[in-house]
């Protein structure tokens, strides 16, 4: 029997957590492009009673689209109502007709789509041996592709093997030879004709420009037929840019993408969850695909889908709707201002100078070869949080030459263009100083700067 009194451990844990919270929220400038702090409203909703409850439910397809879901737990009338409210709010924000809100991460959203597409492709297969997907056209991991769209990631369980190479049947979008952060659309079209992929996955984890969704959609519809259920499915992984989609950046669903997946906690205001969005119409040859997405979400990939954060996401979506005209454009304006100011301070910034190096929240710093880890560590010692990033011409992720940054979180804490320009001067001093100054030499200056931006904006 363990007679230890854990009171001191619990007290220490709480004190340590409070100290870390204060450090990250009041003393650090967070530039991680995949993070976002949540508002007090979202925090309260996320820890309310549903956070410890279940709500498993499934639509009885045999009873038709108007039938109520079968609920496997009682006492859930409130949360069922809020789930529908969340679907409606997301559809309003993204201008779509369908939203699967039970996936609890962007990675799970992608995994669920791959699983559902495999079921869809095998819907008439009577052999008893389901075939895997392939080919699939994705971004190369070295050129900003997300891990979830790689054979080593979520695609692994669903990929066919190429009979010639013996490797997974994955093709990479050809990069523009003169500008690797953009797709070469003409070579992409030729590759689509040659390989006839089952799925295209637009969107990246290193994303500084729009994707040519509309042009490729038009080509695929012309080449294969829009209503041909065997044509390539076009998916946009909006994990990083979900909160920017629309007028400020691009609207992949309006451009013809079949599906948009995303994380709700990067540029979107939500807690950590995922979504799958679509405009697949009733009667569409792809309607069964959406049915498989719902089925593979539950009972395929989730049981308890974290009702507390689901309620928090509803509050966050109302905040996004309230500030839809202001917040995304300010994030992008700030990123452009930050990139220009860093360049003016003699730092090398990736991207097209004609659009101020970025069209998203992300800014990419190029360091000396393989020095990305060192610079990120140096910045962290001075209370600036970033992440090292391998660039397209690096030999491996272990030799990263880049530092990836995002403006979304500090925009929400009130920073504007002039503030990012001012901050770029301090940031550049740190990078240029390198090891010439003691470790953490600029920490107090960063803390003093951050002290001006602790209040959260764009909140309800």
Image: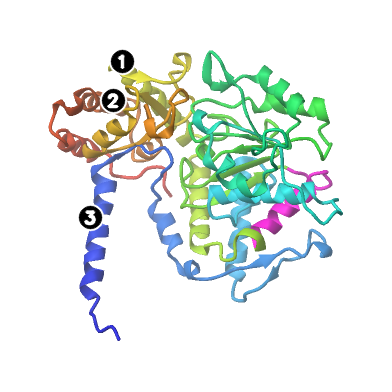
In this image, 358 relative to 14: left or right?
A: right
Residue position for label 3: 19
Q: Quadrant of residue 300?
A: bottom right
Write the residue at 47% across / 25% down: 392
Residue 110 appears in the picture as rendered: no
Q: Is residue 286 magenta?
A: yes
Q: Does the CB distance between marks 1 and 2 fall below 8 Å?
A: yes
Q: Secondary structure at mark 2?
A: helix
Q: Main secondary structure of the magenta part?
A: helix
In this image, 2 relative to 234: left or right?
A: left
Neighbours of disc 2 within 10 Å: few (<14), some (14-19), many (20+): many
Which of the marked residues, 3 or 1, is nearer the chain's N terminus? 3
Write the residue at 45% across / 36% down: 327
Q: Is residue 98 magenta?
A: no
Residue 358 appears in the picture as rendered: yes
Q: Secondary structure at mark 3?
A: helix
Residue position for label 2: 424
The x and y percentages for residue 368 are 32, 22
Residue position for label 1: 344
Q: Which residues are magenta?
A: 280-298
Q: Secondary structure at mark 1?
A: helix
Write the residue at 61% across / 56% down: 85
């Amino acid at each position: 029997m363990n007679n230890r009194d854990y009171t001191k451990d619990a007290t220490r844990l709480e004190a340590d957590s409070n100290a870390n919270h204060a450090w990250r929220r009041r003393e650090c400038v967070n530039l991680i492009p995949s993070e976002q702090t949540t508002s007090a409203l979202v925090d309260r909703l996320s820890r309310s009673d549903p956070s410890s409850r279940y709500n498993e439910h499934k639509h009885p397809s045999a009873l038709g689209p108007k039938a109520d879901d079968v609920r496997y737990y009682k006492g859930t009338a409130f949360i069922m109502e809020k789930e529908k409210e969340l679907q409606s709010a997301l559809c309003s924000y993204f201008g779509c007709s369908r939203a699967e809100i039970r996936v609890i991460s962007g990675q799970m959203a992608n995994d669920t789509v791959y699983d559902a597409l495999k079921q869809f492709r095998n819907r008439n297969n009577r052999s008893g041996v389901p075939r895997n997907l392939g080919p699939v056209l994705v971004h190369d991991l070295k050129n900003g592709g997300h891990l979830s769209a790689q054979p080593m990631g979520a695609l692994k369980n669903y990929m066919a093997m190429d009979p010639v190479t013996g490797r997974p049947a994955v093709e990479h979008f050809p990069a523009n030879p003169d500008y690797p952060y953009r797709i070469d659309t003409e070579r992409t079209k030729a590759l689509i004709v040659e390989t006839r992929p089952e799925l295209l996955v637009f969107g990246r984890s290193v994303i500084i420009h729009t994707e040519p969704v509309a042009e490729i959609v038009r080509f695929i519809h012309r080449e294969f037929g829009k209503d041909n259920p065997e044509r390539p499915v076009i998916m946009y992984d909006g994990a990083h840019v979900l909160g920017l989609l629309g007028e400020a950046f691009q609207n992949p669903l309006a451009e013809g993408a079949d599906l948009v997946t995303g994380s709700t906690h990067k540029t979107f205001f939500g807690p950590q969850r995922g979504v799958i969005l679509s405009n697949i119409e009733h009667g569409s040859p792809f309607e069964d695909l959406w049915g498989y997405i719902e089925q593979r979400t539950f009972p395929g990939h989730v049981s308890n889908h974290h009702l507390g954060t689901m309620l928090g996401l509803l509050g966050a979506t109302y905040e996004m709707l309230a500030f839809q005209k202001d917040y995304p454009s300010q994030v992008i304006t700030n990123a452009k201002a930050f990139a220009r100011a860093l360049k003016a301070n003699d730092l090398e910034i990736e991207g097209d100078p004609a659009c101020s190096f970025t069209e998203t929240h992300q800014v990419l710093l190029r360091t000396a070869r393989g020095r990305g880890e060192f610079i990120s560590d140096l910045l962290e010692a001075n209370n600036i949080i970033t992440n090292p990033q391998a660039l397209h011409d690096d030999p491996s992720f272990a030799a990263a030459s880049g530092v990836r940054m995002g403006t979304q979180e500090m925009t929400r804490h009130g920073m504007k263009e002039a503030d990012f320009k001012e901050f770029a001067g301090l940031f550049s001093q740190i990078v240029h100083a390198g090891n010439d100054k003691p470790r953490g030499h600029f920490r107090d200056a960063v803390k003093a700067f951050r002290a001006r931006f602790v209040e959260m904006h764009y909140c309800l």
